[in-house]
């Protein structure tokens, strides 16, 4: 016998969970949203996307102030009030999560501060912060528990000098030196923040390049900028040994092409990826299957192996992106509502919010080569953009991957300031099946960075106004 019943129980109130709960309520369903936090938001709002972007905005402002010296405007060395900066970040998070709390009330959603585990395929056991438990029956459940930061055994999490992304965003101190283990987007974004605040940042990556998922010609612009701001970027390098000392953490690096070398750091940020949060959920009690990597198995409707249970977001597989979770939320809820829908996006955009930003959507040139596909690639350099020149930011390109026979747009990559905003237009073009002519004939405002998208398309025909590259004749 259950204590309460609900039509839809949503477990986890991150960007996937609260989006699912809100839509289900909008469609007239009785909804219970379950999460330990005071308000919805999840890792993204509380400890990820939002606080990191708030600090990255400050980082970019500091960098721009330094760059302005070349234009005849000098601001001097910035004075960092870490307490005020931390409070501003906290206020941003509180404002957004509080707003979501009000939306929960407006939609008459039952919000329960608790953790949840399946007792069986139709029942959850809820455990509140004080240890009290109760049961909740459901017709449908949507699992949106997200992911957790992965760790490394040689860097124990119980040492307060070892950080994950959450610790780094707490901004408790600005260390003199910081080692970032991992050259992915989390490590590079947070490393950028601390470098701008005055920390000597070293990045170590075991692969031969940064940002493994992005094309090399995009990353080179970012790497050039980071090389100037970071103390060192060590590629093809592994951590061989770690020694904890009173004066810091002594790390020994190794690799195929170099002899082991040691260096002392005040703090170490472990940013080697994230893993799905499935522990303690009682998935086996509900008959929910997981794959070899720990992700919940789902079909095209986000339904798990248990007919009444759906899974969305990080817990349900790659890519681990908030906007992918929100999209899956719609698919799951509309399936529950009886609509004939399926998760089948043409492109899911990815953005790295460094300076410059790197963004891509659809087929990358690297993936095309791996698949043996014949594609045409056009690149419009931002050095030829009037708007980029006025900003003093020629460090970018807009790149298109095109089917040479049909002209259809297959993928887009952008590096430069504002790339994360620009990629949305490209994603829409990909979803609508646009070709190079469609993009080239779309009037873009001048002077803007968005024009580079249009001119990159015109390069395919050899008619770009601000970049001369005649179209190659077919043999």
Image (cartoon, rainbow, N blue to C red):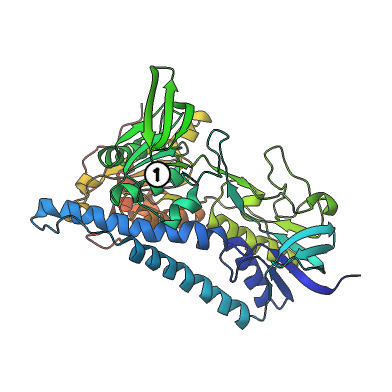
Question: Residue 98, how many percent across, how many down?
Answer: 52, 75
Query: Residue at 46% of width from left, 26% of height from top?
Result: 238
Q: Quadrant of residue 124?
A: bottom right
Question: Residue 267, how many percent across, how many down?
Answer: 41, 42
Above or below, comparing residue 132 to residue 102 in the picture: above
Q: Compare residues 302 and 236 and report the one nearer the observer.
A: 236
Q: Is residue 329 left or right of residue 429?
A: right
Above or below, comparing residue 94 to residue 432 in the picture: below
- In the displayed image of the protein, which residue is found farthest to the left? 72
- In the displayed image of the protein, which residue is found farthest to the right? 1
User: Which quadrant of the figure contains the N terminus?
Assistant: bottom right
Which residue bears the numbered disc 1? 188
Q: Quadrant of residue 438?
A: bottom left
Q: How many marks?
A: 1
Can residue 339 be seen in the rendering of this structure? no
Above or below, comparing residue 136 to residue 366 in the picture: below
Q: Is residue 277 left or right of residue 441?
A: right
Q: Quadrant of residue 340?
A: bottom right
Question: Residue 474, how many percent across, how many down?
Answer: 35, 30
User: Which quadrant of the figure contains the C terminus?
Assistant: top left
Q: Is residue 127 left or right of residue 466?
A: right
Q: Compare residues 469 and 190 and report the one nearer the observer.
A: 190
Query: Residue at 87% of width from left, 70% of height from top?
Result: 2
Check disc 1: other Cα within 10 Å, few if <14, some if 14-19, many if 20+. many
Question: Residue 412, how many percent across, how many down?
Answer: 41, 46
Q: Secondary structure at mark 1?
A: helix
Can residue 301 be seen in the rendering of this structure? yes
Query: Residue at 59% of width from left, 62% of height from top?
Result: 14
């Amino acid at each position: 016998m259950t204590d309460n019943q609900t039509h839809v129980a949503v477990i986890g109130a991150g960007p996937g969970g609260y989006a699912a709960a809100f839509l289900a309520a909008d469609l007239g369903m009785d909804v219970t949203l379950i999460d330990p936090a005071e308000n919805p938001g999840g890792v993204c709002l509380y400890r990820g996307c939002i606080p990191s972007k708030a600090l990255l905005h400050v980082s970019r402002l500091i960098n721009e102030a330094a760059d302005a010296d070349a234009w005849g405007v000098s601001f001097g060395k910035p004075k960092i009030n870490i307490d005020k900066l931390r409070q501003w970040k906290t206020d941003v998070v509180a404002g957004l999560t509080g707003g979501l709390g009000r939306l929960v009330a407006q939609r008459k959603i039952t919000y329960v501060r608790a953790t949840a585990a399946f007792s069986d395929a139709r029942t959850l056991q809820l455990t509140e912060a004080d240890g009290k438990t109760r049961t909740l029956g459901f017709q449908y459940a949507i699992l949106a528990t997200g992911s957790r930061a992965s760790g490394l055994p040689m860097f124990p999490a119980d040492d307060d000098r070892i950080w994950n992304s959450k610790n780094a965003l707490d901004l408790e101190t600005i260390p003199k030196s910081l080692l970032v283990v991992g050259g992915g987007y989390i490590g590079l974004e947070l490393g950028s923040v601390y470098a701008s605040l005055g920390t000597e940042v070293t990045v170590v990556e075991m692969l031969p390049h940064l940002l493994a998922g992005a094309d090399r010609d995009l990353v080179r612009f970012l790497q050039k900028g980071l090389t100037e701001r970071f103390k060192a970027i060590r590629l093809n390098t592994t951590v061989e040994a770690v020694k904890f000392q009173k004066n810091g953490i002594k790390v020994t690096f190794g690799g195929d092409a170099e002899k082991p070398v040691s260096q002392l750091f005040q703090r170490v940020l472990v940013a080697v990826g994230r893993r799905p949060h499935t522990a303690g959920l009682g998935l086996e009690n509900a008959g929910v299957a997981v794959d070899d990597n720990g992700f919940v198995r789902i079909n095209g409707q986000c339904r798990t192996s248990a007919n009444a249970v759906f899974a969305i977001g990080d817990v349900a597989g790659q890519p681990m992106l908030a906007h992918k979770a929100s999209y899956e939320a719609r698919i799951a809820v509309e399936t529950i509502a009886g609509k004939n829908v399926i998760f089948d996006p043409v492109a899911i955009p990815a953005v790295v919010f460094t300076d410059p930003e790197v963004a891509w959507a659809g087929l990358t040139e690297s993936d095309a080569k791996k698949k043996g596909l014949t594609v045409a690639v056009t690149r419009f350099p931002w050095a030829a953009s009037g708007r980029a020149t006025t900003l003093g930011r020629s460090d970018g390109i807009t790149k298109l991957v095109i089917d040479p026979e049909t002209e259809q747009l297959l993928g887009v990559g952008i590096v430069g300031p504002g790339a994360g905003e620009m990629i949305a237009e490209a994603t829409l073009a990909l979803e609508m099946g646009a070709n190079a002519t469609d993009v080239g004939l779309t009037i873009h405002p001048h002077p803007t960075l968005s024009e580079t998208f249009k001119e990159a398309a015109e390069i395919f025909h050899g008619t770009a106004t601000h970049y001369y590259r005649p179209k190659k004749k077919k043999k």
